Image (cartoon, rainbow, N blue to C red):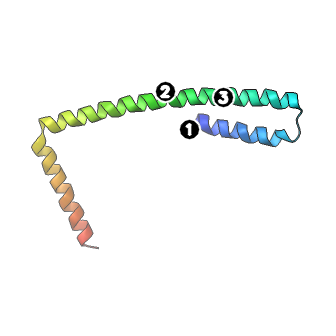
Amino acid sequence: MTDLKSLVADGDDLLQQLVKCSNEEFSAARAGIERRLGETRSRLHHARIAIGREAGRTADSTFEYVQENPWKVFGVAAMAGLITAFVLSRR
């Protein structure tokens, strides 16, 4: 998120300076923004991969727990359903 906020701020700065700068200065600023954009894309890609792996591990752990403890899971789900029904019926 910090990288994205920084990238947006850099883009805003570039737009504000666009009016006052020469072509050379604009090209240099644009190159800097493109470099930061590439870095941010790379970080987001790596974060997406890491989150996907962690979600897969969590799903595997959950599946394993449900396989080993089906009645506990059923009991918790039934209790959650009863509580939800009770709360909704009181409205």
Q: Residue visible at 18% across and 51% down?
A: 77
Type of amino acid under label 1: Met
Type of amino acid under label 3: Arg
Checking the image for residue 46, the label placed there is 2
For residue 71, what is the image quadrant?
A: top left
Q: Residue visible at 74% across and 27% down?
A: 31
Residue 91's place in the image compared with 67, above or below, is below
Determine the CA span between mark 1 and mark 2.
Answer: 14 Å
Report the side of 25 relative to 47 (left or right): right
Report the side of 2 relative to 81 (left or right): right
Between discs 3 and 2, the one toward the N terminus: 3
Contact (CB < 8 A) between labels 1 and 3? no
Per the image, the residue denoted by label 1 is 1
The percent position of residue 26, horizontal first and vertical second, equals 82, 32
Q: What SS does tag 1 mark?
A: loop
Between discs 1 and 3, the one toward the N terminus: 1
Checking the image for residue 36, the label placed there is 3
